[in-house]
Image (spheres, rainbow, N blue to C red):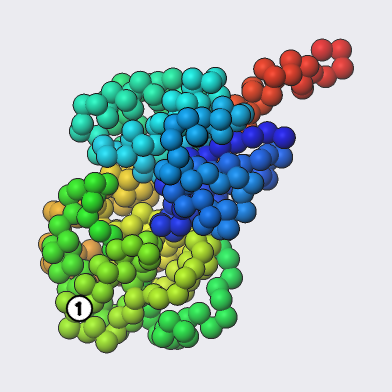
Amino acid sequence: MLKIGISGSYGGLNLGDEAILQSIVTQLRAAAPCEITVFSRDAKDTAARHKVERSIPVRDLSRDEVLPEVADLDLFILGGGGILYDEAAAVYLREVAMAQEHHVPVLVYAVSAGPLHDAAARTLVRDTLSRADAVTVRERRARQLLEEVGVRDIEVTADPAFLLEPEPLPADALHREGLNEHRRLIGLSVREPGSAAPDIDENHYHALLANAADYMVDRLEADLVFVPMEPRRKDTQHSHAVVSKMANAHRATVLKGEYTSGQLLSLIGHFDFAVGMRLHFLIFAALNRVPFVALPYSSKVAGFLEDLDIAMPPLKHVNAGQLIAYVDRWWDLRRNLQARLEKAVPEIQARARRTNEIALQLLDGQRRRRDPEAGRGPGA
């Protein structure tokens, strides 16, 4: 049986990252018998959540302890997700270097890149990815940045989460969250500042979103639902911070329940509209054909909007009046946006499947190297 390792920002902290892993695992298992090892920040969570054969607490182990796990693989997958930025690149590329040292094929799987300002990080990314067997990214901006760094032969595919399947919600989930599905529901998403989002000014965007939220309550007679994509970390805190600035705070709810990525995908399908920052919140809206306004805080969100041919300035350049104007415009044009999503999403999903096809090609090549007779037909 083929042995595949997957390394990324996994371990239950971010439901978008878990959607990526779930989709990669599902695609691989549907295509070939395989034993999957995930290099995770929380091995117990990953094993329970994804039912993989092995889950390694990679951040708790030394290089020498991880090396045997990597060397035994038929394919090492890095990604997906936004993992190649200044403060994280060296962490995630450690296992890639191990795989390359032991001649294990490496696939960089639909990643994002940036910010990459640090010279040492740029050099490490260039040198490591240039030795990978295949490099795929999920948006054109990531390809542009990696080419600037010095990486070549990069294919743009798409985020694996576009292939996520919805899962049934727990019984009475909406009722337990205090939501009335017979009322107009608008979802919102926030995120914390940090090394992956250095341009975020939380005071700016808290006030910005609170003002827009009050406007949507007044003009659209909507109830607002804040969706923490990282419920164990700071998304919940920042959601409450926005609510605290609202005049209509009584019309806002912050989700409290624990959901899988697939369940959250189903829940977002109950929304009439969405306004948000986090990429996978927006992807889940797109999968449900829920019209939305995005707040692009990073290149990965801007790249997603480019795929949909939606113009939106970076978050740091948006003021309160502009955001209300965008909400007004896209609410009035929501049927047009739904039609755009209906056309674009299947095309993006086809690109997402392409990454798995590349993985299967690399696995087939590895199988042939190990068994030269494999795949030879009669008379070959």
The residue sitting at 23% across, 63% down in the picture is 326
The one nearer the camera, 194 or 269, is: 194
Quadrant of the frame with the C terminus: top right
Residue 354's spot in the image, x, y percent? 55, 37
Number of numbered discs overlaid on the protein picture: 1
The residue sitting at 20% across, 33% down in the picture is 117
Q: Which residue is mark 1?
A: 244
Residue 108's spot in the image, x, y percent? 46, 32
Q: Which quadrant would residue 114 be assigned to in this image?
A: top left
Q: Taking 186 as reference, is 248 above or below it?
A: below
Is residue 2 visible from the viewing direction of this image?
yes
Residue 118's spot in the image, x, y percent? 21, 31
Q: Taking 159 as reference, is 190 above or below it?
A: below
Q: Residue furthest top?
A: 380
Is residue 344 visible from the viewing direction of this image?
no
The residue sitting at 56% across, 46% down in the picture is 55
Task: Describe the element under mark 1 as helix, strand or loop.
Answer: helix
Q: Which quadrant would residue 150 be assigned to in this image?
A: top left
* Residue 348 left/right relative to 356: left
The residue sitting at 68% across, 45% down in the picture is 30
